[in-house]
Image (tube, coloured by chain):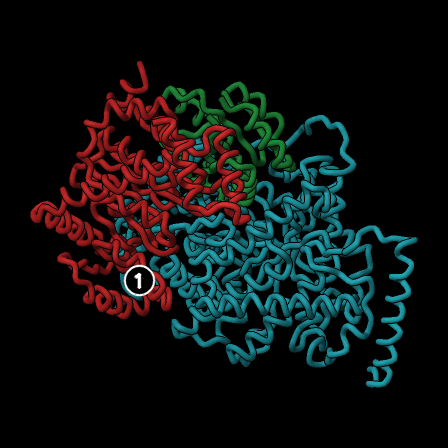
Amino acid sequence: MYTKEKMTQLEEKVNEFETKTKATLSKHPERHETFFTGSGDEINRLYSPVDIQDVDYMNDIGLPGQFPYTRGVQPTMYRGRLWTMRMYAGFATAEESNQRYKFLVEQGSSGLSVAFDLPTQIGYDSDHPLSEGEVGKVGVAIDSLADMEVLFDGIPLDKVSTSMTINAPASVLLAMYIAVAEKQGVSSDKLRGTIQNDILKEYIARGTYIFPTEPSMRLITNIFEYCSKDVPLWNTISISGYHIREAGSTAAQEVGFTLADGIAYVDAAIAAGLDVDTFAPRLSFFFNAHNDLLEEVAKYRAARRLWAKIMKERFGAKSSKSMALKFHTQTGGSTLTAQQPENNIVRVAIQTLAAVLGGTQSLHTNSKDEALALPTEDSVRVALRTQQIVGYESGVTNTIDPLAGSYYIEAKTNQIEEDAMAYIKKIDDLGGAPKAIDKGYIQQEIMDAAYNYQKEVETGERIVVGMNKFQIEEEAPKGLLRVDPAVGERQKQKIVDLKAKREQAKVDETLVALKAACEGTENVMPFILDAVRAYATLGEICGVMREVFGEYQQSVIL
Amino acid sequence: MTLEERLINGDRRAVARMITLVENNDHDAFEILKKLYHRSGNAYVIGITGPPGAGKSTLTDKLVKHIRTLGKTVGVIAVDPTSPFTGGAILGDRVRMSDISMDPGVFIRSMGARGHLGGISQGTSAAIKVLDIYGCDYIFVETVGVGQSEIDIVKNCDTTLMVMVPGLGDDIQAIKAGVMEIGDVFAINKSDRDGAKRTAREINAMLDFSSKDWRPPVEMVIATENQGVDKLFEQVEVHRQYLEETGNFQQRRFDNTKNELIEMVKHKIVGQLMDESYKQEIVNELSDRVAKRMLDPYTAIDTLYDKVIKQES
Amino acid sequence: MDRPIRVLVAKPGLDGHDRGAKVIARALRDAGMEVIYTGLRQTPEQIVNAAIQEDVDCVAISILSGAHNTLLPKVVALLKQENAEDILVVGGGVIPDEDIPFLKESGISEVFTPGTPTEVTINYIREHVK
């Protein structure tokens, strides 16, 4: 774009500007001596062509739907169709969650997103001692296929796409979904949706793990293989940076650690004998959206470019679908304040804009009351409306990647890519993500960032409106969603009824077969499916796997 | 009931409180220990040390679990000597002892390395006595083997178990200098990893050079999967038998006690030197004069000894 | 006798969000306290057992799963059963204001909701341990 001579001239002009400006600072000081992004990276007064002079447009930025996908993974992006507005929901029993899903579909939600309660996520039935007080609290309680049938009652599974936030027992919940579809007369090749299925970030940040690394990785590759044949439209994993960011990481760490996890899954699948282009097109990602709008936009663009290069250069992928990083976004839960919760609506709007300007494929927007409790229907509606306003009124959807070419955005995209690559390199040196987690490297980096953030908030260096500045006297918020404490008892009774009704011999037979499969090297998916169809409970199935595989031991990094 | 009575009765809170008190050099606690010392000496004390990340806590967890199947009670003292200057510490070893943490026959205590007057080794040594009096059959003292203070800790033990992991590379060279020789039994943990056999070979080669009577055995274990743990404990028992049969057991306890007494005297004297401001002034003044070459250190020591220590005896 | 305050930082329940627990653990450490950290998924029985053996002055419980009304009072009750009601119990996490009176009645001395500066928690513990 610029000749060498012109660039030199420009550089001089910019330097001149900086010198002049600095000279006036004693009279007109800036608000801070140094400015930082939300992640704490230093940020310049001004960006100009000088900062991106090494950028080669076609190689580094390119065109939408083309390598390296910096500008987006589809050629028409939101001109073709808006992102999927997918609201994460679920609480109490299958009956109540089913009502909420129907409400969301009526309100214009275009995909379902199932939140499971913690016992379900950790593979315990509602009657397990550790489930005490947890049943139905942060999501819906699913103990068996019977609950799953109720959950999707009246929702045609060939018409909706369903995302399930489930990791350690993902194979079991996917099997239940397939079995419900069978009963609806929908064959598995028509099913669309996603399972999170990302165990590494559970070890790093989210904590709902069950099995040790090796068998967990086997379950994941078993799912890849099974779905590539039987559930071809299903996204088999959602490699998640969301929780890494929530745990306190920076934007560059979010990208670096998430893609390092992605590399580990691809490695594992290739080691299991799968061809990269059979499973890689079904990999998807999941990122956070924080408040620093421009840094976040750059983050998504950097992640896309870096993943495309990794797939092409490191893994020799041939299919363009293997190189295109598709991602879901959720606005940042940890950015919400319990103080003046209405302010959260504004935060969520900014974060929505970041995700959309960053080219997300689907989005969940948090509700204003989520720093306090699960959201009410009213606040969920506002959160969904926020997406709709950005989608239909803001105009940012009418042209593709509108911030591209901004000197700052491109410079920031480069920088995040570089920083993320450095983290990946470090993790490679440690022997890959599982080993780096085992050694506590990733957790330590995140914890250090989180502690720094906390200190900045407490010293007032970092302002959180309504929390450490512009506070008011507030009354306790009313009308929060409360989960009926009797849910646990109801769910326990359901298990008793189920066990009395089902054909026990069939359950025993399928569980014995599953155990043998776990001990061997076969793909366990068909065996799990058989057990699910026989109405074996989640706890029984995971119990068999716990017996064979053992349990993960957390390495605590403080 | 007094703390002393509660301790004898096996009240867990009393045990816990006693450890807190001795850790803080509480005078009354030492009075109780004086009275009850004759009840101690029955516990067999096992030190566990090794580099950071070797899996010591997990191995302790599994060893204790194994010993419990033999019907014996166990105390565990998990020492974390690394903490910043604030005096605070985060002690996280319990996390890896989930198998035994709820067993009423096991008592686990975490200790940091705050400013113990007598150094941390005396804190642990007093805690060992408390658990001994409480009636533990075995007491484990677990600590990272990186410095002199940790070596001092495990020196108080009857058998010291050295935990290594494959892939330490040059670290082994660094460790062998001071720490290797205190190991009575070696465990190569995470032995399913690459390089485990090589690590075992290297350690064996080093041990072959030693001229001691006892040739430490080297065992391969995978603590997380409970593999090789019972065999490892057998080796500890073999070492114990060796000590007892050769008379080395009494010798070792004599050596350890003598060491400990000398250390305690040293610290008592140092304490006396600093416990009142006028004495500190004398120390400062003498130091100043020695530093400025107005006085030689040998005369200074004589003065100090006469003016401060002798006065009190 | 000047000895450091010992605090057990505990995470009961099944949720794995330990950012808050770890941040508070570090802050207490930097304030000169000795912190014993228990890791995830601790039952009230495990928490109380650790509190007794470690002779802590305070149990600080972090919980985000929504099971606070079940689990926190249970910790207090078990401490009482062990004659250890002198140990200060505080809680923190996503806990709605309307649950706080019940928790306090159950013997939780103070509840710190999201956004509370660590300094506030530190000072509270300093002033209230026995």
Q: Residue A54 appears in which quarter of the rendering?
A: bottom right
Q: Is residue B126 left or right of residue A24?
A: left
Identify the residue at image location x=58%, y=25%.
Answer: C100
Q: Nearer the viewer, residue A83 or B259?
A: B259
Identify the residue at image location x=77%, y=72%.
Answer: A51
Q: Which quadrant would the N terminus of chain A be assigned to in this image?
A: bottom right
What is the residue that sits farthest to the left in this orientation?
B245
Q: Residue B132 appears in which quarter of the rendering?
A: top left
Q: Position of residue A173 (x, y in %)?
A: 45, 52
Q: Is residue B9 left or right of residue B86?
A: left
Q: Three-letter amino acid code at disc 1?
A: Lys
Q: Which residue has dot 1 on it?
A: B176
Q: Is residue B119 above or below residue A240?
A: above
What is the residue that sits farthest to the top in this orientation?
B1
Q: Is residue A495 left or right of residue A239?
A: left
- Chain letter tied to red: B
User: Can residue A152 be seen in this snapshot?
Assistant: no
Q: Is residue A470 above or below residue A235?
A: above
Q: Colour of chain A?
A: cyan
Q: Is residue A405 left or right of residue A516?
A: right
- Chain letter tied to green: C
Identify the residue at image location x=21%, y=48%.
Answer: B159
Q: Is residue C64 above or below residue A421?
A: above
Q: Position of residue A479 (x, y in %)?
A: 66, 29
Q: Nearer the viewer, residue A35 or A222?
A: A35
- The secondary structure type at the circle numbered 1 is helix
User: Can residue A461 be seen in this snapshot?
Assistant: yes
* Callout 1: chain: B
